[in-house]
Image (cartoon, rainbow, N blue to C red):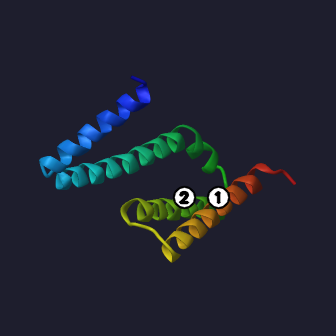
């Protein structure tokens, strides 16, 4: 038996157990908990990166550049939270991607301006 067929049979068995034992609510609860854990893991990695590398460099920038970079990152985190905890479709998805693009551009442009010597 090929590994693909074996894995499909394992998935079908798990799906049958969920249906027979009426475990849809438990499955949804686990899904929500995993979504929250994933969001927290991303936040922790971002914080560790900032603590180790970004804090010293950003601290030497002018106040306006610091406000822009931290504002862009904060808005991006709120935007990601909105994406993780809401179901985005249509206009909501468009707004998510536009806000993410604007935040990314503002942060990149500020970083580039601070790294470019004129």
Q: Which mark is residue 73?
A: 2
Tell me the SS state at disc 2: helix
Image coordinates of residue 53 in percent, x first then y, are 58, 39
The residue at the far right in this view is 118
Q: Can you say whether 41 is above or below 108 in the image?
A: above
15 horizontally vs 113: left or right: left
Q: Nearer the viewer, residue 38 or 115?
A: 38
Tell me the SS state at disc 1: helix
Residue located at (51% from left, 69% from top): 93
Q: Which mark is residue 46?
A: none
Q: Residue 100 occupies which quadrant of the picture? A: bottom right
Residue located at (39% from left, 22% from top): 1
Q: Nearer the viewer, residue 71 or 37?
A: 37
Mark toward the start of the polypeptide (2 vs 1): 2
The residue at the far front in this view is 1
Q: Can you say whether 57 is above or below 94 in the image?
A: above
Image coordinates of residue 110 in percent, x first then y, are 70, 59
Q: Which mark is residue 107?
A: 1
Q: How many marks?
A: 2
Image coordinates of residue 115 in percent, x first then y, are 76, 49
The reply to whether the C-beta atoms of the residues labelled 2 and 1 are less than 8 Å apart is yes
Residue located at (66% from left, 63% from top): 106
85 horizontally vs 67: left or right: left
Residue located at (43% from left, 31% from top): 4
Q: Quadrant of the C terminus?
A: bottom right
């Amino acid at each position: 038996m090929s590994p693909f067929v074996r894995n499909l049979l394992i998935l079908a068995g798990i799906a049958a157990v969920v249906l027979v034992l009426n475990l849809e609510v438990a499955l949804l609860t686990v899904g929500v908990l995993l979504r929250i854990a994933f969001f927290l893991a991303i936040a922790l990695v971002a914080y560790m990166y900032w603590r180790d590398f970004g804090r010293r460099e950003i601290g030497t920038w002018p106040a306006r550049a610091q406000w822009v970079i931290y504002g862009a990152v904060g808005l991006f985190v709120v935007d990601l939270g909105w994406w993780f905890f809401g179901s985005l479709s249509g206009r909501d998805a468009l707004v998510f991607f536009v806000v993410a693009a604007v935040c990314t551009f503002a942060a990149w442009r500020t970083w580039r301006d601070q790294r470019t010597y004129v």
